[in-house]
Amino acid sequence: MRFRRRSSADRHEDAARTWAVCSVLLDYPTEELVSSLDQLEALVPDDAYLAPLFAHLRDTDLRVLQQDYVATFDHTRKCALYLTYFAYGDTRRRGAALVAFKDAYRSGGVEWSEVHGELPDHLCAVLQFGATVDAAIARQLLEDHRAGVEMLRIALAGWRNDDGSVGSPWAGALTAVSGTLRELAGDEAEAVRRLVEQGPPAEEVGLSGYGADPALSTGPTLISSATIPVGAPR
């Protein structure tokens, strides 16, 4: 027989590798990240979506990478890496959604650290948690915020670069993550359409204990059992 049907275990393992790699590639670029590119690529050697990002990270000066990263993820509302932001913006309901992320991590046996002031819904943190702690809980968090993940993918795919080209170098990472999730349908597809047209809700309420606009918020994220730092130091 020439073909072997892929088992659900194979697919889960592939997703875990993709999440582990993307949790690093979507983090703030550092010398440590750049020096680890060969090891990261070895985990996903046949991923056509991530290959261009690996090449870009290798071929671009670190200072330029850092400037582009901040301009993309920190200063653009539709490219925020915070999953609850797409559903709630800075509205009162967002606080409860952030608490739900902390509770989910706790149910997986780890505690969210508040030391560095990062928010628990950061995409890199969720991916890291799924790759290293509990894949099922992380998948549920991602599926619950599937429309936000898709909005971020669309925003990065349509990003306009200074040279006139279209598509953020980081777009492939979101496409790779989206490929590990179920297809959008029904109300979620409608939610994405509204997000594309209107952006996240804009009511400003001040998230006590969680900082200000997540599109402008950075700092390392640490889950107690994790080893990969998330977020850009400022």
Image (tube, grey):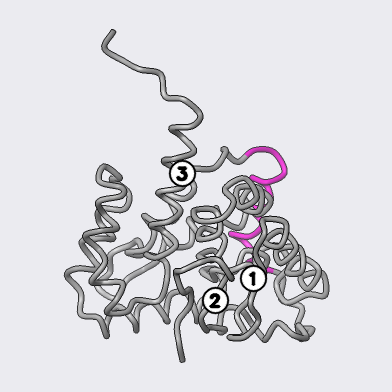
Q: Position of residue 230 (x, y in %)?
A: 48, 73
The amino acid at mark 2 is Thr
- Which residue is pictured at 41% across the width and 58% down the height? 22
**Label 2 sits on residue:** 221
Image mark for residue 196: none
Q: Is residue 8 above or below residue 100?
A: above
Q: Secondary structure at mark 1?
A: loop
Image mark for residue 15: 3
**Label 1 sits on residue:** 120
Which comes sooner in the sequence, label 3 or label 1? 3
In 3D space, how far apart are the residues under numbered discs 1 and 2 (Cα atoms)?
8 Å
Image check: 166 left or right of 218? left
Q: Position of residue 164 (x, y in %)?
A: 28, 69
Image check: 62 left or right of 154? left
Span shown in magenta: 185-200
Q: Mark 2: few, some, or many residues within 10 Å (few <14, many ≥20)?
A: many
> Is residue 60 one of those drawn in magenta?
no
Cβ–Cβ below 8 Å for labels 1 and 2?
yes
Q: Position of residue 137 (x, y in %)?
A: 65, 50
- Which residue is pictured at 42% across the width and 24% down the height? 6
